[in-house]
Image: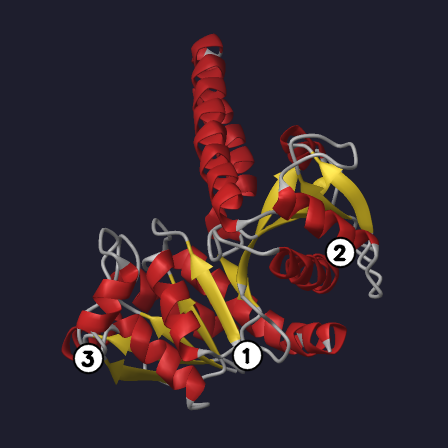
């Protein structure tokens, strides 16, 4: 498995990408990493780690897409940017997958420009795994396609169901459609059309009907489908809410347990880790002919290493092959 790692992507790049790559390589003897970015800087950082460089290749790039830049404009001005080079490496079959903690819009835009879509896929989408009261739920799409059509959402249901089954081990994932009400006939035209497609699908998609926002974290479905605009808002609100609640709970416990502060802090550290993005690494851009994992901008080395492992797992489980067969 050869992964092109966007070394310049992320709030703490490139150091965390160098460290994450080395950690992943040490844990997986079948992994090779193409470290894409400022070649001179990366060589210097790699030399300071003392790593032998085995299965790690530096690929030169010129610049990167900043978090505050408009993706399409930045890609036009920087055709040799690190994420653009990563996609070209996968297009030329020099890499089997891509991992990036950089500008999400830049990653998606470069992918759309490459047209590396699986046969039959109209638009790729980002799938993210969220914790619920009953386990874990895949939410798709969370930002790749804010102007989705009903056909796109139907394909997201098929792709996310396969991802849930193969990567989360849920034998028969229940698929729900995000809506303002659970009754049939609710929602705008896009949601109603998607509902009809899912209800009358020839492929056994496991559709259980509409899911309201609160049903997401109650675990009413194993897969929840929505357009990218809605999904991104849900994801960002969820991140903020979770951070606020954990901090408030931690402060309350620490104030009531003066002599046991270290125990309380340890307990909440373990609880927080269960829901942190760095434990799962990244969110896959499903529908791509290859593997692409998008990491949080605040990722650390552990998150990058986990994303590299996740990319390998996607390849080994042949998620793409199953998606292509289902959409044929």
Marked residue nearer the N-terminal end (3 or 2) = 3
Image position of 136 (left or right of 227)? right
Q: Tell me: residue 134, above or below residue 127.
A: above
Horizontal and vertical percent for residue 94? Answer: 42, 89
Horizontal and vertical percent for residue 211? Answer: 71, 37
Which element type, helix, strand or loop, lies under badge 3? helix
Marked residue nearer the N-terminal end (2 or 1) = 2
Label 3 to label 1: alpha-carbon separation: 27 Å
Quadrant in which the C terminus appears: bottom right
Marked residue nearer the N-terminal end (3 or 1) = 3
- Residue named by callout 2: 197
Give the number of the disc on residue 39: 3
Which element type, helix, strand or loop, lies under badge 2? helix
- Residue named by callout 1: 289
Q: Residue at x 22, y 58 (%)?
A: 66
Q: Tell me: residue 327, above or below residue 14.
A: below
Q: Nearer the viewer, mark 3 or mark 2?
A: 2
Q: Nearer the viewer, mark 3 or mark 1?
A: 1
Horizontal and vertical percent for residue 22? Answer: 38, 71
The one of 166 and 252 positioned closer to us in this rendering: 166
**Residue 124 in view (yes/no):** yes
Q: Nearer the viewer, mark 2 or mark 1?
A: 2
Q: Residue furthest top?
A: 256
The one of 126 and 17 positioned closer to us in this rendering: 126
The one of 208 and 161 positioned closer to us in this rendering: 208
Q: Residue at x 55, y 49 (%)?
A: 227
């Amino acid at each position: 498995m050869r992964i092109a790692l966007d070394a310049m992507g992320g709030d703490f790049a490139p150091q965390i990408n160098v460290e994450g790559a080395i950690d992943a390589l040490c844990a997986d003897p079948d992994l090779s990493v193409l470290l894409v970015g400022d070649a001179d800087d990366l060589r210097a950082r790699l030399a300071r780690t003392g790593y032998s460089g085995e299965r790690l290749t530096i690929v030169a790039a010129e610049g990167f897409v900043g978090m505050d830049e408009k993706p399409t404009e930045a890609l036009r001005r920087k055709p040799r940017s690190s994420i653009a080079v990563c996609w070209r490496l996968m297009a030329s079959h020099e890499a089997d997958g891509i991992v990036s903690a950089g500008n999400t819009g830049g990653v998606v835009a470069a992918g759309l420009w490459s047209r590396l879509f699986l046969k039959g896929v109209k638009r790729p989408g980002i799938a993210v795994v969220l914790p619920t009261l009953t386990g874990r739920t895949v939410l798709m799409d969370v930002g790749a396609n804010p102007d989705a059509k009903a056909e796109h959402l139907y394909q997201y249901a098929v792709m996310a169901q396969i991802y849930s089954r193969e990567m989360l081990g849920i034998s028969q994932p229940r698929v729900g459609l995000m809506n303002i009400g659970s009754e049939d006939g609710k929602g705008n035209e896009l949601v109603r059309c998607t509902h009809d497609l899912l209800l009358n699908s020839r492929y056994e998609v496991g559709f259980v009907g509409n899911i309201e926002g609160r049903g997401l974290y109650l675990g009413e479905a194993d897969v929840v489908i929505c357009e990218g605009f809605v999904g991104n808002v849900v994801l960002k609100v969820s991140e903020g809410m979770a951070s606020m609640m954990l901090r408030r709970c931690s402060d309350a416990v620490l104030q009531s347990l003066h002599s046991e502060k270290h125990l309380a802090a340890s307990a909440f550290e373990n609880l927080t880790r269960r829901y942190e993005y760095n434990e799962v690494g990244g969110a896959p851009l499903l529908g791509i002919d290859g593997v692409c994992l998008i990491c949080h901008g605040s990722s650390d080395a552990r998150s990058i290493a986990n994303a590299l492992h996740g990319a390998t797992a996607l390849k080994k489980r042949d998620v793409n092959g199953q998606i292509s067969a289902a959409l044929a």
